[in-house]
Amino acid sequence: MSGGPSVHVSIESSCEKQVQEVALDGTETYVPPLSMSQNLSRLAQRIDFTQGSGSEDEVDGEPREREWTKHEPDEEEGTVKFQPSLWPWDSVRNNLRGALTEMCVLYDVLSVLKEKKYMALDPVSQDPSASKSPQVFQLISKKRSLGTAAQLLLRGAEKLNKSVAENLENRRQRDFNSELLRLRSQWKLRKVGDKILGDLSYRSAGSLFPHHGTFEVIKNTDIDLDKKLPEDYCPLNVQIPSDLEGSAYIKVSIQKQAPDIGDLGTISLFRRQPKTKAGLQLSISLCHSSGEKKNQRAPPERPKSDDHLYVLEHNLHQMIREFHKQQLSSVMMPHPATAPFGHKRLRLAGPQAFTKSQISALQQGEGLLEKIIKQAKHIFLRSRTARTIDSLASRIEDPQIQAHWSNINDVYESSVKVLITSQGYEQICKSIQLQLNIGVEQIRVVHRDGRVITLSHQEQELQDFLLSQMSQHQVHAVQQLAKVMGWHVLSFSNHVGLGPIESVGNASAITVASPNGDYAISVRNGPESGCKVLVQFPRNQSKELQKNDVILESKWSHLRGPYREVQWSRMEGRNFVYKMELLMAALTPAP
């Protein structure tokens, strides 16, 4: 057999899972393996918790374990033997036996307490402090924790107070070197010997002013640092020459020519004197005020209005920056950097008194002076317009005039929207809405219907125009009110050719009739003459008309008679439109 061919033997591992079912087609269904929890419970059921408990576990001198071994077959080694109960009611018997034991013990305890033969129970006195000890300990612990937190907060507050005080002290006690560094960043300083000198002149920019403009910087030692320092304390002091103290400015004014104009200290900067026929003279004055006059006692002066134009100042600064930017971008910088900048002939235009034509010939476009003049004209025209509108609004209560200025404007043009309304009837009376475009030398007025009117820079012309518009507003308000009240408009005109002539604008008139046609109201309103209201009654209600033998039929009695004027000042009402509404309501027949 050893010499025969080898035979391959296949060894198949035994099935670890038990077969639960074999189907008709030969498919085997295996029992699923136990999970970890199921396996643990299975092993726990095999443990005998009554093993080794004493004589109760032995029956006929043999342990119960031996009896269990007689009834079940031997199992493989290494596996836990399952020890079932002897009979099904074994667990019930054990529970009843445990309950009986507990009841017996309870009966014995109660009998001992009741008979008092064997033991007596006396109440034990309790210490009141011992019962409250948990609460006391809790309060003490809370108090300690709160005290610790308060100490931490107090320490932090002290540190903060110290840091704030140190910051204030450091801010007040600024050292001399830091202030000197700040001064050096804004002014030109140099050290000459043991002195620190500064330069106030504009010689580095090409100025030919003969004054040296030197000031000295010294240390301030007048204040004791140990004491409390004032708020305006500064560790350095600046000494300026006496002839440079105070303020100086150039004043340009146009005034009427006077024979003693030279006594005012005015210096003429032009070669050609103005013509005497005009009656006006341009005065350019250099004004200087020193600080000595402030120390002298002077009578209190009345507060003057602030004439400083901040908007014009901002526009001029912006225009000068743009001008310099254009010049720097188109012209090469001078070499060296301290050389004068710009055209040489333009720098001589002021000292040599060039005329406008000569300056225009040297410039390629509009000059800086022309731009400044245009901006100044626009600012002054805008202020005049605002002053005119405000004066009319404060002087005339009916109708009301409102101005809404635009925040987005041009340097040469501004716009304002003017509304003329009546109090309480803003939704009905919206006829007069004006848009004023304020330019350099004129004002363009745009009406609601698109009509454009051009006004000059004269303040009186704008005032007359607004007065005429306010007069027309009253007549337009009557027209709108008649439509709401159901009255009929018979005639309407913004420019009446009859009656007295108005010195300002033209008068407006309107005639309305009641819904049944019995009454008629005629209104004439002028900017100067004012308002005049007439009412026409039916002929049969007029007592002034005498009976006429010619008119015999009664139908002619329904015609309206003559007009009668209404005493408008004695009418009740807060404004013109309200009085007109009461008058129409009184003349409207009841339904």
Image (cartoon, rainbow, N blue to C red):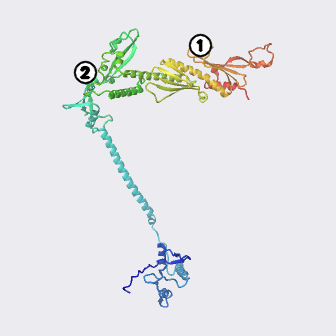
Q: Foreground: 484 or 200?
A: 484
Drawn side of residue 530 relative to residue 359, left or right:
right
Label 2 environment density (alpha carbons within 10 Å; few <14, some 14–19, many ≥20) = few
Could you tell me residue 467's position as x and y percent? 55, 20
* Residue visible at 32% across and 34% down in the picture: 232
Tally of numbered discs = 2
* Residue at far left of view: 193
Question: Which secondary structure lies at badge 2?
Answer: loop
Q: Which residue is mark 1?
A: 501
Could you tell me residue 463's position as x and y percent? 52, 19
**Would residue 302 be visible to someone looking at this image?**
no
- Which amino acid does the dot numbered 1 rest on? Ile
Q: Which residue is mark 2?
A: 210
Drawn side of residue 439 relative to residue 333, left or right:
right
**Quarter of the image with the C terminus in it:** top right
**Would residue 124 be visible to someone looking at this image?**
yes
Asked which quadrant contains residue 332, the reply is top left
Question: Which secondary structure lies at badge 1?
Answer: loop
* Residue visible at 38% across and 28% down in the picture: 318
- Which amino acid does the dot numbered 2 rest on? Pro
Label 1 environment density (alpha carbons within 10 Å; few <14, some 14–19, many ≥20) = some
Drawn side of residue 207 relative to residue 445, left or right:
left
Q: Foreground: 234 or 300?
A: 234
Could you tell me residue 350's position as x and y percent? 32, 18
Q: Foreground: 290 or 18?
A: 18
Could you tell me residue 171's position as x and y percent? 31, 39
* Residue visible at 69% across and 17% down in the picture: 563
Q: Foreground: 577 or 245?
A: 577
